[in-house]
Amino acid sequence: MRELVEVAEAPLSILAVPDSGLSDWISVCHGLWYDIALIVPSAIFLVFLLYQSRRSYWKLSYGRSYIMIAYYGLLWLVSVLNFAWCFLQAWQCTPGKEFSWNILSLLTTSGMLFLEVSLVAFLLQGNNHTSGLETLTRTFVISGIIVGVDLFLKTLYVFGFGVDLFVDVNEKTSRVKWGLWIVHKLLLTATYCIILLMHHSKWRERLPARPAFYKYISTMFILNAVALFACLLMQSGAGLGFWLYNLTIICYHAFYLPFIYITFLSDFFQEEDIHLENVYYSEMKDAGFFDADWE
């Protein structure tokens, strides 16, 4: 009788195997829709960069701007790390993957923070499309120091004190963790707030005269302010904070990189397109292609 039961249950177990495949891998921690909201936008942006890579490489080679080359290369690196981070969310709750998840999270968040800090530091100097190597070096040194300190403190808390900064699978997490994130988000929010206030002060002339810059600063201020509020709610034990915090995570990891590309890098490539069109037109005019229009 026991053998018959085992034989009868065997087909059911075989049919259940596909359920533990990719769908379970994606939805094992936060749920299917959360992971889709992270994976799909990051994958689309990575495909877009790949599709534009040949034209972008040619334009960067033609423009010879150290600044744009450095930021484009950095954007590629961070985009790959961010896609891996979005796709491997299941590592958060997979036994034996804690160390790998923490390393991946440290690299990804540090890369995005470096891009965020260096972009603001560079734009505050008011030299958007300069090709000066000195400006690039100074900006990256300042950003590297800030991000290096942030990386050291996160590593110390994660591996030294055992604080799960990057594990967000449930609401019942350490109050120390949310206290650290409160400080982190508070510093970022205060930085963007100070830049916005500078626009209405006597230091206004030190800011770049670009509407896109203020849209970027305003957006990042709102995002970090909402994340700060969510962390405060989590610290106080409010369940709404967990949902709100996850929403800010989705917005940051899914849309921040496309946002800075559209806001800043696309202008550079578009200006190159206009310049090249003028060059092509001049060359064709000199070759007599438009002489027939006057006959």
Image: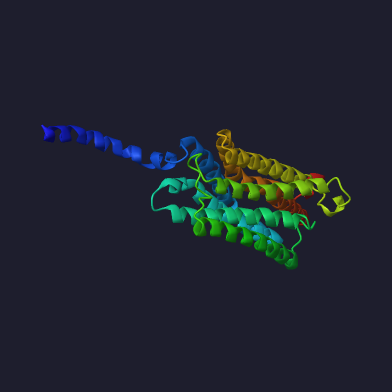
Q: Residue furthest right?
A: 202
Residue 281, position as x, y percentages in the image: 75, 52
Depth order, front residue of 62/292? 62
Given residues 224 and 178, the one toward you in this image is 178
Is 267 above or below relative to 143?
A: above
As drawn, the residue found furthest toward the left would be 1
- Residue drawn at x 59%, y 56% is 110
Q: Is residue 207 visible?
A: yes
In this image, 226 relative to 44: left or right? Answer: right
Looking at the rendered image, the quarter that the C terminus falls into is: top right
Q: Is residue 266 found left or right of 43 in the rendered image?
A: right
Confirm whether residue 295 shows in the render. Answer: no
Could you tell me residue 201's position as x and y percent?
Answer: 87, 48
Residue at image position (17%, 35%) is 6
Viewer-side residue, 77 vs 138: 138
- What residue do we see at 43% from left, 46% from top? 93
Of the 4 image quadrants, the one containing the N terminus is top left
